[in-house]
């Protein structure tokens, strides 16, 4: 009998361990699939300058993904299109958003963790480039966490992935993490000299910002400079000169720093690269202020403002206004000082919506990082626990079934009792699992927070409106200030677009379904329908849109008339407050 139980142990436990190992292997694409995906990603870089060329290159792979139901390949396809759209349009646009959301929607349709981590890093870095670092943070942390469980030989586009993480964390002020990823990136085999120069240049910059070894930073800049020269990468060469100027400025060797910056400016201007020209000019302005050369500062401010015409680089414009303010104070020019202060205040207000104020934002991001990291650790611990429980019960089930088969006749009564206990434990486990799932899903969503925000917003609007009524016409200035404050509470077109993106993340098909059901509705109709469905009445909707309740009422009457027989369906839809 002892021998029988030993054999039975090996029959059940060893296959269970094999299943566990297969589960780890199956969680990523095979090496062959990974190489196939990576080849597509790397080859696509050759077509990034033209959307039509990239689309032509990727179309056969899109068709293959549809034909073979390869949703991982389809997600890669959408990410590459989104990134190209961002580059060609010079910033965020409806196509880049749409393609990235499609890539994220496919996450449940495939099991490859290495592809999922790559998609999250790509989308997170895209949001970071859009100056939405707070939105990028959870995605990049998830991607970073995913990399820990993926064998390095199966990580997609490893060097670029490390580079993106290094840039992001370095920008947030987490220099230690940023340096770690950049060092990992530049150590990879097969890295191109051009990419290595870019990574080393930025590695030197983070080393300087972190207060690290200046000699090591200079060494990184010099190696990057030589690589850039060998690759005839003039822009990277110019950037390395500007970064070396930082070191000489710190050493108070201003003439050497100015010499390097002049070369940087000369090359950047000859290449027609306004972005790097502006960057070098801003460094030169800072250097001249340190030297007390105010006359040169004024000239360079004018040059920089000329280059910034039509651009939306609010941070650089804010820094320029700060320099203009200091010059106005030095010269006793009250008018210029007042204009500069007013402009700075406006820019600071604007930058608050773009992760603006560096000190406050950095503190917020670091706190958010810890919060999200804790959530990720907890969620992953629960997932691992559930997997272990499932695997254990599979093994126990096999054990019980085999045991039942061999000793049924001899232990009939005892085996029935075991089965009853087993069924009770299984039911109890299912109940516990359901409770855990319910607990996991109970966290408050951003949409719920937005609904609370709208209610509080209405209270503020009512208060401001009553204050305006009580004030009368006694003080024009005070009334104007109240009106401006009241206006800031309204849902503008920009705020509406941001809210649509929030809806698209939480309920990807919601807006599409509304427009499909009621094809005659306009964008303004859609805005009113969504707000009413969120629980706002006519007066509250009118408040946040800045119109009268009669206007909302008449708008709905016209819509009902236009919809005809569908009007009743619309009202039922609005009265149902469930979004899913």
Image (cartoon, rainbow, N blue to C red):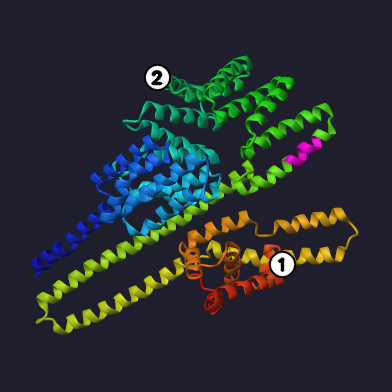
Q: Which residue shows up at 74% across the image and 59% down it?
A: 486
On residue 230, which mark appears?
2
Q: Which residue shows up at 70% across the image and 23% down it?
A: 299
The quadrant in which the N terminus is found is: bottom left
Q: Which residue shows up at 40% across the image and 53% down it?
A: 103
Relative to residue 66, is residue 228 drawn left or right?
right
Q: Please, is residue 41 above or below residue 413 in the view?
A: above
Q: Main secondary structure of the magenta part?
A: helix
Crowd band around label 2 with a 10 angstrom C-alpha radius: few (<14), some (14–19), many (20+):
few
| Residue 212 can be seen, yes or no | yes
- Where does the image place residue 493, in percent across and percent down from the top left? 62, 56
The residues tagged by marks 1 and 2 sit, at their Cα atoms, a distance apart of: 64 Å
- Where does the image place residue 290, in percent across and percent down from the top left? 69, 23
Say what secondary structure mark 1 lies in: helix
Range drawn in magenta: 337-343
On residue 459, which mark appears?
1
First in sequence: mark 1 or mark 2? 2
Marks 1/2 in contact by CB < 8 Å: the verdict is no
Q: Please, is residue 576 above or below residue 181 in the view?
A: below
| Residue 366 can be seen, yes or no | no
Relative to residue 410, is residue 505 drawn left or right?
right
Front residue (pair 89, 147): 89
């Amino acid at each position: 009998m002892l021998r029988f139980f030993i054999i039975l142990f090996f029959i059940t436990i060893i296959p269970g361990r094999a299943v566990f190992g297969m589960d780890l292997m199956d969680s990523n694409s095979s090496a062959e699939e990974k190489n196939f995906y990576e080849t597509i990603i790397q080859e696509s870089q050759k077509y990034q300058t033209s959307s039509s060329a990239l689309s032509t290159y990727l179309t056969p792979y899109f068709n293959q993904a549809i034909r073979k139901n390869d949703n991982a390949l389809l997600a890669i396809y959408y990410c590459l299109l989104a990134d190209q759209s961002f580059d060609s349009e010079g910033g965020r646009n409806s196509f880049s958003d749409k393609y990235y959301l499609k890539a994220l929607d496919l996450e449940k349709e495939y099991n490859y963790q290495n592809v999922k981590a790559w998609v999250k890093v790509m989308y997170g870095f895209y949001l970071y480039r859009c100056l939405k670092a707070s939105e990028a943070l959870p995605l990049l942390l998830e991607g970073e966490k995913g990399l820990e469980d993926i064998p390095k030989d199966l990580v997609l586009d490893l060097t670029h992935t490390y580079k993106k993480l290094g840039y992001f964390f370095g920008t947030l002020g987490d220099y230690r993490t940023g340096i770690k990823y950049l060092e990992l990136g530049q150590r990879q085999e097969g890295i191109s000299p051009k990419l290595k120069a870019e990574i080393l240049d930025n590695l030197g910059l983070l080393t300087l910002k972190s207060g690290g070894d200046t000699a090591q930073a200079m060494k990184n800049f010099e190696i990057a400079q030589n690589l850039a020269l060998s690759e005839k990468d003039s822009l990277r060469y110019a950037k390395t000169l500007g970064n070396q100027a930082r070191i000489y400025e710190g050493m108070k060797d201003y003439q050497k720093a100015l010499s390097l910056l002049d070369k940087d400016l000369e090359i950047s201007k000859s290449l027609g690269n306004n972005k790097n020209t502006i960057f070098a000019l801003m460094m030169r302005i800072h250097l001249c202020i340190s030297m007390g050369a105010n006359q040169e500062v004024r000239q360079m401010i004018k040059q920089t403002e000329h280059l910034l015409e039509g651009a939306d680089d609010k941070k650089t414009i804010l820094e320029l206004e700060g320099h203009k303010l200091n010059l106005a104070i030095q010269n006793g020019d009250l008018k210029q000082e007042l204009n500069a202060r007013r402009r700075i205040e406006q820019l600071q207000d604007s930058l608050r919506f773009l992760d603006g104020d560096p000190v406050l934002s950095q503190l917020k991001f670091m706190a958010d990082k810890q919060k999200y990291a804790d959530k990720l650790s907890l969620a992953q611990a629960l997932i691992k626990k559930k997997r272990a429980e499932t695997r254990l019960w599979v093994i126990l089930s096999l054990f019980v079934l085999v045991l039942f088969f061999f000793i049924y006749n001899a232990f009939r009564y005892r085996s029935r009792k075991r089965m009853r206990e087993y069924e009770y434990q299984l039911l109890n486990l299912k109940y516990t699992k359901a409770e855990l799932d319910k607990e996991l899903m109970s966290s408050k969503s951003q949409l719920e927070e937005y609904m609370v925000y709208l209610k509080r917003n209405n209270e503020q609007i009512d208060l401001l409106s009553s204050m305006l009524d009580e004030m009368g016409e006694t003080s024009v200035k005070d009334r104007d200030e109240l009106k401006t404050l009241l206006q800031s509470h309204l849902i503008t077109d920009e705020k509406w677009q941001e809210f649509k993106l929030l809806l698209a993340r939480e309920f990807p098909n919601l807006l599409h379904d509304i427009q499909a059901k009621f094809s005659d509705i306009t964008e303004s109709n859609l805005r009113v329908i969504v707000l009413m469905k969120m629980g706002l009445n006519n007066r509250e909707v009118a408040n946040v849109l800045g119109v009268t309740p009669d206007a909302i009422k008449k708008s709905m009457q016209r819509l009902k008339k236009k919809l005809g027989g569908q009007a009743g369906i619309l009202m039922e839809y609005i009265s149902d407050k469930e979004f899913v």
